[in-house]
Image (cartoon, rainbow, N blue to C red):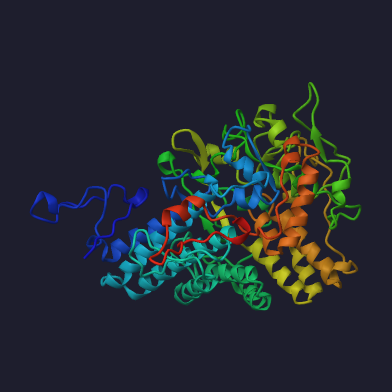
């Protein structure tokens, strides 16, 4: 029988088998594990852990780690207008073409994401193929492991669909080829839904390990997939059940955390708002979220490197509110003075206008000069690497606090870059509530949809979420109100959808969701929003004057040209991979 080899990240790197033959040539290579050695419960567990590791560590070392992740700081965040690349123009210059909508089919970041999808899929398939052979595995564990693997596979391919569209190859679980040749001529949503349905049927209600998905996590992933398919009625029913009855893998009833910081803190994570989170560690100082390692304030700031992923002026100013404490739903903020501007000689890099009322979530999601940055104090000027190239704002949500640092939660990736043991919530209750609101609005149930929106807004306005100066005073002119029942959003579907979409922008800011939302809301909507974003941003950052409008047809990124060339043609001369028409 042909042997299958796999590298088991971290956990299995020291698992080396001895000789299984009588001659030198019959010995298995050191550092790899033969198929026969994995045909048992221990082998399946190791392979399952390897599949999890593919989600959260450097999955394919042939590429850089920055997009080998389900956290889309470039494709969801920068491409969607939440953030600019930041740093210096020459550092990771491949991102320049993405942020200015001049992406080439040879872009390395695009290829990193493609490689990640198929690396994770391959790891899952290796594990699935061993399960029937593990005769010593009890039935409950067998079902759970298969369910976990089908969940991971559905997640990876869903990420592939979000970035590349649904016409990408799907590799079946029984495929044993290291380089399978499969045409991308079919919509794979059917395969992904089949995987997640299998996961739902197999997973338990709770798990002994909080990082493993339970049945509710699988239902949440399916609900999100259904929304992307615009199957709103089916998703609405499922989301209502999830919100009303769902529990975390460790048995906590789903709900919103009062304190927003509890979702972005290694000391308080895995709480009731976390449905499925990538579990990060500082073990051996090399596993702390490598994909995020560029995205910390620069120099003397927390992390010390590298000044990427700077929130955009457009995002920051969308947190402005009207006299009633409600967001501007028609882009009116783009015609108002900016809440923060570039400082002059002798001033901080950024100077705020505190006469302008803003949603308090602004200073939770975004680092601004003159505003306390978590428990690190006020930012110093050298925290921003190049204001001309990236603007004056800093990422904040996913940056560790001083308390986390003191508790040993900081990590160093690859000997040079910062990392953190902070989890990343891939599926969250806040996301599900807003998806539910969207489904309700699509179904004409505007009052019910706005009830869900107001849940999110009520939490945002709690006292614990107000950023304060050392003397106890609010750090800015914060104002947030619930939508009153007299608001047009309660009766007019178009206005209701605007309110829901704006709430997703504000609540999920800098979480890598924005471009995917814009794309699934339709190419024309995406094109309009991104054109307005670019036109606004170029007032403050000159390089955006050279940005190209993203055409409505490009609701997906291109299949990497290198992958098309490497796969070649089938026996009839037909390419295995065909580029999406908008990118041909």
The quarter of the rendered structure image containing the N terminus is: bottom left
Nearer to me, 424 or 462: 424
In percent of the image, x 47 and y 77: which residue is there? Answer: 201
Quarter residue 234 falls in: bottom right
Against 48, residue 302 (above or below) is: above
Give residue 178's position: percent from left, percent from top: 34, 59
Against 498, residue 539 (above or below) is: above
Give residue 568's position: percent from left, percent from top: 42, 57
Nearer to me, 515 or 218: 515
The quarter of the rendered structure image containing the C terminus is: bottom right
Quarter residue 538 falls in: top right
Asked if residue 378 shows in the view, the reply is no
Looking at this view, name the residue that lies furthest to the top. 346
Q: Is residue 505 left or right of residue 400?
A: right
Nearer to me, 179 or 138: 179
Looking at this view, name the residue that lies furthest to the front. 573
Against 156, residue 200 (above or below) is: below
Q: Is residue 522 left or right of residue 427?
A: right
Asked if residue 118 shows in the view, the reply is yes
Give residue 266's position: percent from left, percent from top: 55, 48
In percent of the image, x 58 and y 60: which residue is there? Answer: 580
Total tally of numbered discs in the picture: 0
Nearer to me, 415 or 527: 527
In percent of the image, x 32 and y 55: which residue is there? Answer: 6
Give residue 315's position: percent from left, percent from top: 75, 47
């Amino acid at each position: 029988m042909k042997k299958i080899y796999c590298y088991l990240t971290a956990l299995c790197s020291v698992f080396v088998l001895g000789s299984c033959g009588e001659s030198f040539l019959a010995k298995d290579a050191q550092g790899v594990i033969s198929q026969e050695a994995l045909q048992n419960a221990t082998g399946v567990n190791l392979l399952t852990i390897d599949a999890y590791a593919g989600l959260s560590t450097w999955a394919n070392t042939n590429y850089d780690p920055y997009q080998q992740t389900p956290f889309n700081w470039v494709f969801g965040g920068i491409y969607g207008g939440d953030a600019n690349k930041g740093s210096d123009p020459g550092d990771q210059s491949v991102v320049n073409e993405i942020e200015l909508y001049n992406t080439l089919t040879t872009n390395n970041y695009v290829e990193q994401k493609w490689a990640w999808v198929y690396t994770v899929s391959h790891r899952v398939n290796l594990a699935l193929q061993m399960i029937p052979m593990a005769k010593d595995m009890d039935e409950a564990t067998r079902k759970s492991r298969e369910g976990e693997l089908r969940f991971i596979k559905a997640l990876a391919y869903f990420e592939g669909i979000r970035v590349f569209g649904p016409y990408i190859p799907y590799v079946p679980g029984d495929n044993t080829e290291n380089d399978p040749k499969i045409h991308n001529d079919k919509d794979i949503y059917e395969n992904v839904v089949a995987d997640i349905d299998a996961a739902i049927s197999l997973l338990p209600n709770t798990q002994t390990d909080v990082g493993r998905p339970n049945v509710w996590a699988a239902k949440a992933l399916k609900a999100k997939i259904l929304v992307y398919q615009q199957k709103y009625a089916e998703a609405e029913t499922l989301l209502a059940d999830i919100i009303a009855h769902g529990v975390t893998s460790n048995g906590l009833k789903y709900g919103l955390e009062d304190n927003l910081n509890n979702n972005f803190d290694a000391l308080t994570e895995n709480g009731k708002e976390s449905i499925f989170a990538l579990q990060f560690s500082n073990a051996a100082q090399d596993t702390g979220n490598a994909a995020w390692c560029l995205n910390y304030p620069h120099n003397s700031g927390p992390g010390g490197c590298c000044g990427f992923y700077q929130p955009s002026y457009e995002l920051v100013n969308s947190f402005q509110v009207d006299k009633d404490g409600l967001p501007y739903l028609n882009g009116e903020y783009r015609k108002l003075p900016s809440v923060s501007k570039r400082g002059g000689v002798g001033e901080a890099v950024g100077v705020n206008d505190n006469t302008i009322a803003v949603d308090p979530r602004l200073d939770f999601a975004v680092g601004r000069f003159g505003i306390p940055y978590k428990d690190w104090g006020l930012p110093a000027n050298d925290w921003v690497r190049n204001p001309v190239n990236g603007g004056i704002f800093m990422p904040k949500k996913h940056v560790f606090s001083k308390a986390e640092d003191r508790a040993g939660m900081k990590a160093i990736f690859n000997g040079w870059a910062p990392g953190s043991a902070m989890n990343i919530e891939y599926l969250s209750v806040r996301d599900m509530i807003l998806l539910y609101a969207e489904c309700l609005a699509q179904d004409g149930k505007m009052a019910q949809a706005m009830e869900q929106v107001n849940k999110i807004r009520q939490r945002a306005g709690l006292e614990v979420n107000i950023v304060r100066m050392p003397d106890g005073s609010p750090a800015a002119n914060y104002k947030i109100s619930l939508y009153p029942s007299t608001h047009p959003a309660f009766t007019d579907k178009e206005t209701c959808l605007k309110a829901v979409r704006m709430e997703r922008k504000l609540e999920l800011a800098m979480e890598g969701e924005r471009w995917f939302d814009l794309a699934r809301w339709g190419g024309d909507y995406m094109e309009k929003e991104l054109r307005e974003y670019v036109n606004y941003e170029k007032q403050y950052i000159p390089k955006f004057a050279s940005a190209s409008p993203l055409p409505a047809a490009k609701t997906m990124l291109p299949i990497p040209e290198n992958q098309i060339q490497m796969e070649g043609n089938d026996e009839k001369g037909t390419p295995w991979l065909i580029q999406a028409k908008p990118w041909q």
